[in-house]
Amino acid sequence: VDIIISEAVEPQMTTMSANAAMVPANITIMDHAASGTRPGNICIDVVFPAPTKVARICFRNWYTAYVTIRATNDRALVSKKDTNSLEGWYAIAQDYRLMENAHCEHESQLWHSLAREQLSSEESVIALRFFLHQPSPNWKSIG
């Protein structure tokens, strides 16, 4: 899985620009099947070493029809790996469409970029959980 996450950084006092800069965030990626679901549903956790304000999420699709991204500020929830319970996780992107037609290969490997304005939260997070969904039986693996 190719994922790039940029972290918002306050500008230096010597910088003339009022815009926040973006730097790549250090992350740990853990993937696991969403429990109790068919093979077309996968869950990937992205864990930050410290609370991070996400400025942009960029990723390359691999036959995923749509994605839901949830965030948490509770490190203990990440270690549980319980994908059935959403307690403590809140959606920052819900059912974001990656492929117009889940049964066709067109758009199946495109890069996508979600800017802060497209995410429903601007607060610092400790982890993101990506729920990847592919309802089509045409694809044996997604990610």
Image (cartoon, helix red, strand yellow):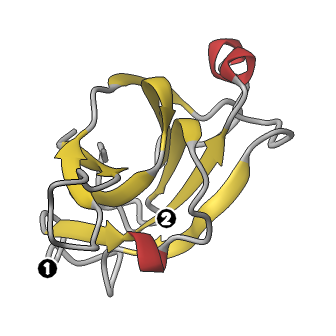
Say whether residue 24 is left or right of residue 103.
Answer: left
Q: Position of residue 124 (x, y in %)?
A: 57, 45
Pointer 2: what residue? 135
On residue 79, the disc is none
Q: Nearer the viewer, residue 79 or 135?
A: 79
N-terminal label among 2 and 1: 1
Which SS class for mark 1? Answer: loop
Say whether residue 106 is left or right of residue 64.
Answer: left
Whether residue 11 is situated above or below residue 127 in the rendered picture: below
Q: Position of residue 3 (x, y in %)?
A: 23, 44
What's the residue type where badge 1 is placed?
His
Q: Is residue 58 visible?
A: no
What's the residue type where badge 2 is placed?
Pro
Say whether residue 27 is left or right of residue 44.
Answer: left
The residue located at (34%, 53%) in the rendering is 10
Pointer 1: what residue? 106
Which quadrant does the N terminus fall into? top left
Which quadrant does the C terminus fall into? top left
Q: Position of residue 53 (x, y in %)?
A: 47, 49
Which SS class for mark 2? Answer: loop
